[in-house]
Amino acid sequence: MIEIFGIILSLVMFISFSLFPLNIKSYQKIFYAQNDFIYDFLFLNLLINFLIMFLVSFTNLNFFYYFLFIITFSLIFNIINYFNNNNFKFKIFKKLNFLIFIFFNLILFVFIAKNPILSWDGLENWYYKAQHFFYNDNFFNLRDTIGPAYYPHFGTFLWGFFWKNSLLQYEYSGRLIYIFVFLLSIFSVCDLIKYKKNLKITTIFIIILVCFDIFLFMGYQEVLIFSFLIFASKNLYYYLEKQKKIYLIVAFACLNFVPWVKNEGYLFLIILNLSLLFNIKQFKKKDEIFLFILLSTLMLIIKQLVFINFQESNLVHGGKVYLPNLMEIIFFIKSLFFGFVIAIIKYKIWLFICFGFYIFFKNNKLKRQYKSLIKILQINLILFFILIIAIYFSVINHSYGLNWWIDNSLDRIIYQISGLYIIVLPILLNNLKFKF
């Protein structure tokens, strides 16, 4: 019973971080939002807190004091808003959709609590980083922990922070934040579906069903990248539709968190920047896009300089230049093809994404209406495919063997990047002419 109470308190804590420092009126004023803003509002507050927590991870500040500060001020702030703002009460606490969100969180929290084991990678490469932050240590001392020093730290900081500040201080309590962010991203992107409430709930359920993999919640970091990419693509879509730079700023923050979660995140960011650059003619405010690319590049350089000076830097993870013979190339193509097939069967969200792209390209009206977004995603997908070939080509002669690399990482790489493309599904459903 005490564990259930601890789980509920964890959810209350996550929601508290998502309801402060902005209130709904402030959010509406900044984003000119009118409808379907609940999860965007929750995420923006969480993103602001993540940015602060990211900075805190480099300091000697006692994390518990920061936790108390947020919880206390969030409670006072939201009690005042609750009684003074009818709009607040209606939009958040009285929506069936939000109650479903709470329900899904509790169900998956219990699911993790019943099976709290860690995977090999979660234990060997990530757990000790989370434990490092559990004991209130900072980024600069990570070199002394078990596991690769060149692995980024932000996902494990969240893990350690919420583990430390949970009721029972059970290790899995820290990983529950991954579920909260995962569900928040899916509910947020499905808010693009308008006027079809039953269809929206059904779509949410299907996406959760095909994207939830208990294995990835056993200490892996892929779910955070998946979720950040969902929020990034949604805000890029908003930017293309409304031409308001605040959406580009939010997308920038989401995307620049990704390299601090996993090393391959810097490749995802580079690819997206190239996609924006190749489509620069599609944008009305080209200077804002150039600035986005320039600042993203600068952030990547800063990240690498920080790791070179204080941890280790290893961008290729054992990769090297190698000229294989014809038989090795044939073996490479065959292995990669079967790896793709298995990964797509495992993460069936790609079947829906591919079908969505097919409909967009077959429907000239939709293709014209969402031309800029589809072109960016299309070029990104092509570059991503080239990237995968390059990654695995670099390990074709590795001592572990090509098949080992494909079996142990290709499905997770494909899973991560799917977050960027899920947006095509709610947009497509929103434009289909049928009753539901």
Image (cartoon, rainbow, N blue to C red):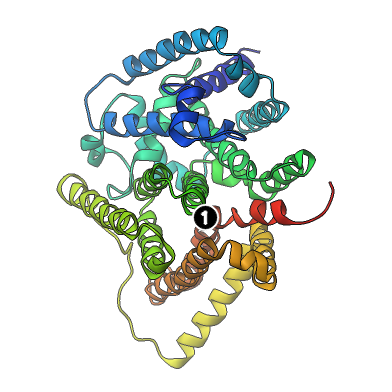
Q: Which residue is found at the position 39% from the left and 70% from the top?
A: 278
Q: Is residue 132 visible?
A: no
Q: Left or right? Give the position of 140 relative to 400.
A: left
Where residue 261 sits in the image (x, y, percent)?
A: 39, 45
Q: Is residue 48 above or below residue 92?
A: below
Q: Is residue 428 above or below residue 187?
A: below
Q: How many marks?
A: 1
Q: Which residue is found at the position 52% from the left and 48% from the top?
A: 234
Where residue 83 sits in the image (x, y, percent)?
A: 56, 7
* Along the line of sight, the residue nearer the viewer: 239 or 54: 239
Considering every residue shown, the one lying at the far left of the view is: 309
Report which quarter residue 147 is drawn in: top left
Q: Which residue is found at the position 38% from the left and 72% from the top?
A: 398
Q: Left or right? Give the position of 135 relative to 233.
A: left
Residue type, mark 1 in image: Leu
Where residue 379 sits in the image (x, y, percent)?
A: 47, 70
Where residue 90 sits in the image (x, y, percent)?
A: 65, 19
Residue where numbered disc 1 is placed: 420
